[in-house]
Image: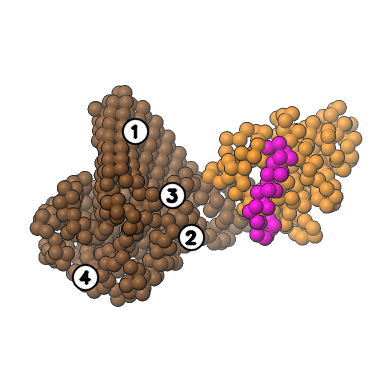
Chain colours: A orange, B brown
Amino acid sequence: MIKGLDLTINSGETHVIMGPNGAGKSTLANVIMGHPDYHMKTGSIEFETEEISEMATDERARKGIFMSFQTPEEVDGITVSDFLKTSKTAVSAQRVPLLAFRKELADKMKLLKFDPAYARRYLNVGFSGGEKKKNEILQMLVLDPKLAILDETDSGLDVDAVKIVTEGVGHFKNDHNSLLIISHSTKLLDEMHVDYVHVLVAGKIVCTGGRELIDRINRSGFSEFAPDAKS
Amino acid sequence: MERVKTQIEDIERSIYDIKDTGHRSYQVEKGLTEEIVREISEGKNEPRWMLDLRLASLETFRRLAMPDWGPSLDELDMDQIVTYVRPDAKMSDDWKTLPDDIRGTFDRLGISKAEQEALSGVGAQYDSEVVYHSVKKYLERQGVIYTDMDTAVQEYEEVVKQHFMKLLPPGDHKFMALHGAVWSGGSFVYVPAGVEVDMPLQSYFRLNAPGAGQFEHTLIICEPGSKVHFIEGCSAPRYNVLNLHAGGVELYVREGASLRYSTIENWSKNMLNLNSKRAKVEKNGTIEWVSGTFGSHITMLYPTSILSGEGARSEYTGVSFAGEGQFLDTGTKVVHAAPRTSSTISSKSISKNGGNATYRSAVVINPNAADSKCSVVCESLMMDNQSRSDTVPVMDVRNDTVDIGHEAKIGRISEESIFYLMSRGLSEEEAKALIVRGFVEPVTKELPMEYAVEMNRLVGLELEGTIG
């Protein structure tokens, strides 16, 4: 549940949402992406001055919004390569030449040290957690969205996964795109440039600041941000 | 926020639905009588034994009851079915000599193009008779025979007599008996010992006449060490009256021979498809069934492998797709009747808009089938809450040295998977089509390229958004 949340992300910025379990972090990601199980009673979501809260998920994706899933779905019978080409064609709204696509895919996989054999495997089927994570980051690099939401709520993010995400973000981020990282832990943020940190508690942003907020959370957790906390 | 729900409509079937008019030079009266059976046989100038077989089958048909299991066949009224319709075209090995719209029909279905590019031989049946048959000359020189069944009865009478309806005895069930009485058309294939036919042979069966039945008979003999891939396709335009298909397929796979039999069935939704197919496989021989069932109102189809020689092998890969008003009851039967025989069964079925896709199989392991192996995997995917899927696997094992595996999965299409794909820019329709295509991919990859494309096109769902 999210109530009374107000967030503006300008192009070029990296925002981080942190908060305790059940604060509504994943809900926020799903609402922005338009998951059918989440309903918005009031409020609005604007993307590049356009109201998108009534748009279907795929339309939002074609506007340039991307979300990296915590637990990506396994889809049998469709290869990573075929899927990404279909997806790239959909979001870029133009024909994607096969050879150029293959080259781009191979380059990006190399960048992520992702075994090229995985391009021919079925989407996430039998992938380890780390491989699934790599595949999400690979998709982000290939689709090159204007806003990428990384849902990393999972507190079990291991060292390898942290490295994959950090490096992937390094390749992705530039002055024209934006990043919204949703996280429970701070490990992920150590090596990353961060513009704003928001603390989400019980569906509300209770505090906004810069990187220094991360240190505060590291020292004393989220308890001091609880709405009824007296600190 | 109201969610846009998607309904999956029928398979896009415009090219199948084009009807030709006025190509009947002759047809029998509706219904089934001894006179009609005699008339069919006489028109074909058949030997006496064939007429006797037809008449005996008719007697059997009258005696046998309708099946008391599977989908209800109450709608079928044999008095309303025309069992024989002769097109006004003589059989030819030259498409140019066929009437324009008959030729046009097979052109639209891609048969003549496939013939040039990827097939060793082609047969094309229109209603009750084969109108086109041809096989590459170099195969003829190696002794390969590929011709229509009626010609085979005349020219290879002894071989036909030895094999015809020996695997499909008319007494087995009512529609086998019906087939024996009124069969017409179909293909005859003979591959001599050691000959490997490099590209597939294809027969296509097109039923154009409303209210008619099609009863083609396919007989394939693979001599020791030979190899061939046979493809069968079928379709019909849609009418408001019931059509009936009760074909018969008999496959003889001799020692060390290998036969792949692929079917893409896309009958219109007024068709009762009650087909019988059986293969007898001798020592170290292999039969592979690839079966795609998309069309028809009701289908009951269970290709059967009788593994009669040591080391004989059977592989069945099937996919069925049942939409509104369809009841597709499909599967396979395997009889392990010799030591060290093996079979694998893999079935995928999809149901949507209230369709019923039922998987039914029987595996019999005889007491003498020591050290045999069998593996069964059947999966069903339901696209909505109105659709139905049933799994009826039966195993009868009479030997305790066998290795048997069975795995069944029934599931609904995952909303999370659809959301995942949509978050990558695919529309809901594309996402569903992708999931379904992926689901049937193990089958499509078994098909030659052109047919894999055809299968994907058939599964390429036509979708429509409605607010719900």
Where does the magenta region start and end? A91-114
Q: Which residue is mark 3?
A: B447
- Which residue is at a point 46% across and 55% down the rendered structure image? B450
Tell me if mark 3 has few (under 14), some (14-19) or many (20+) residues whose alpha carbon lies within 10 angstroms of its own.
some
Residue sitting at the far top: B401
Residue type at numbered disc 2: Glu
SS assignment at label 2: strand
Q: Earlier in the sequence, mark 2 or mark 1?
A: 2
Residue type at numbered disc 3: Leu
SS assignment at label 4: strand
The secondary structure making up most of the magenta span is helix
Tell me if mark 4 has few (under 14), some (14-19) or many (20+) residues whose alpha carbon lies within 10 angstroms of its own.
some
Q: Earlier in the sequence, mark 3 or mark 1?
A: 1
Q: Is residue B409 magenta?
A: no
Q: Viewer-nearest of labels 4 and 2?
A: 4
Q: Are marks 3 and 4 in contact (CB under 8 Å)?
A: no
Q: Which residue is mark 1?
A: B342
Residue type at numbered disc 1: Ser
Labels 3 and 1 in the same subunit: yes
Label 2 and label 1: CA atoms lie apart by: 40 Å
Q: Which mark is residue B9?
A: 2
Labels 2 and 3 in the same subunit: yes
Q: Earlier in the sequence, mark 4 or mark 2?
A: 2
Place residue A217 in its image quadrant: top right
Label 3 and label 4: CA atoms lie apart by: 36 Å
- Which residue is at a point 73% across and 54% down the rendered structure image? A64
- Which residue is at a point 67% across and 60% down the rendered structure image? A94
Label 3 and label 1: CA atoms lie apart by: 22 Å
Q: Is residue B148 above or below residue A78?
A: below
SS assignment at label 3: loop
- Which residue is at a point 66% across and 56% down the rendered structure image? A96
